[in-house]
Image (spheres, grey):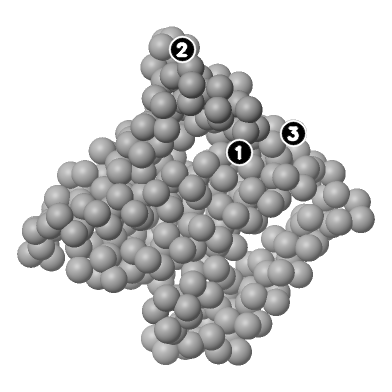
Amino acid sequence: EAIVNKGYLFILTTAFLFGTMETALKFFGSLFHPIQITVLRFFIGGFMLLPLARAALKTHGAVLTKKDYLFFAKAGFIGVFVSMIFYQLAVVYGKADVSGVLFSCNPIFVAVWAHFLLHETIDRYVISSLVLSAVGILSIVNPFHFRGTYLSVILIMLAAVTFGLYSVMGRPACQRLGGVTVTSYSFIFGAAELLVLVLLGRTAPIGHLLTSAGLSVFADVPLLETLTPSHLPALCYIAFAVTGAGYASYFMAIELTNPLTASLAFFIKPILATFFAAMFLGETVMPNMLVGVGLILIGSLTNLYPKLKAK
């Protein structure tokens, strides 16, 4: 019982840290270039998880092969290079609460990707959850009186879709190597791939090419040279707490309970994301936002219901 209670403590810690993510990125956004903070937080987070990853490999009796490293490179490209760039830009261009809630519906896309890649059945619960979540998204976006930017909504939905793909493509590897191993190494590889693009974008020819293609956000990206002691508290919170400790806490919750119970953190996150955005960023919580949050939560729980019932 004490172990289970400890597991719930890790679930609440995960929900709190992940719930502050969008608000922290928006609040400290003026201190960092969006690509710069993405590179730094996933490098730091990935290396923070490395001791847990090595312990997980011993537990699973697994040894990493060349094929595994190639997989980490592919997963890192989808999960960090693609998904987290969409995510970071969505937070920059839009409202933190909208980004936090919409990204929380990524488990729905996991179900869709699992159908196509792992041939899992899309049953009536999945269909119901998709419909409820879609109505919830429409309620939040509120096309007739939308107060944010459509670009940010498109970006966060692309982030959720691609993160769903990252989650599904990593599932077989997670079973063999442990979830924390896949997360740690894919974060490091994804950050390294993004670093390559950043370094190329700092050269005159590539930087000019990116700018002329309308991708100036990838040109002349600073790395460490713009950081001062005043940046450290923000960097420590975003990289060490939200990314590193957040994911470490999530995997500890899985270890002490089970993946299904640990996923409760993602149902608490949208409520906290909305609360923190209102408290620290002064973002107004409109009635349509509350309705949307409720519908997405109900949709997610509907998807979870048959698994809970089976237990």
Above or below residue 44? Residue 228 is above
Above or below residue 111? Residue 163 is above
Tag 1 residue: 89
Mark 3 vs mark 1, CA separation in Å: 20 Å
- Whether the residues at callouts 1 and 2 have beta carbons within 8 Å, the answer is no
Q: What residue is rendered at 76% in x and 70% in y?
A: 135
Q: In this view, does 26 lie to the left or right of 203?
A: right
Which residue is the extreme one toward the right?
A: 144
Instruction: Give the number of callouts.
Output: 3
* Residue type (three-letter) at the residue carrying disc 1: Leu
Mark 1 vs mark 2, CA separation in Å: 20 Å
* Residue type (three-letter) at the residue carrying disc 2: Thr
Q: Residues within 10 Å of mark 1 (few under 14, many from 20)?
A: some
Q: Is mark 2 on a helix, strand or loop?
A: loop
Numbered tag placed on residue 282 in the rendering: 3
Mark 3 vs mark 2, CA separation in Å: 28 Å
- Whether the residues at callouts 3 and 1 have beta carbons within 8 Å, the answer is no
**Which label's residue is closer to the chain start, 3 or 2?**
2
Q: Is mark 1 on a helix, strand or loop?
A: helix
| Residue 229 position in % (x across, y down) | 42, 10
Q: What residue is rendered at 60% in x and 55% in y?
A: 158
**Image quarter for residue 60?**
bottom left
| Residue 108 position in % (x across, y down) | 56, 70
| Residue 140 position in % (x across, y down) | 77, 57
Q: What element carries label 3?
A: loop
Residue 231 visible within the image: no
Tag 2 residue: 226
**Image quarter for residue 64?**
bottom left
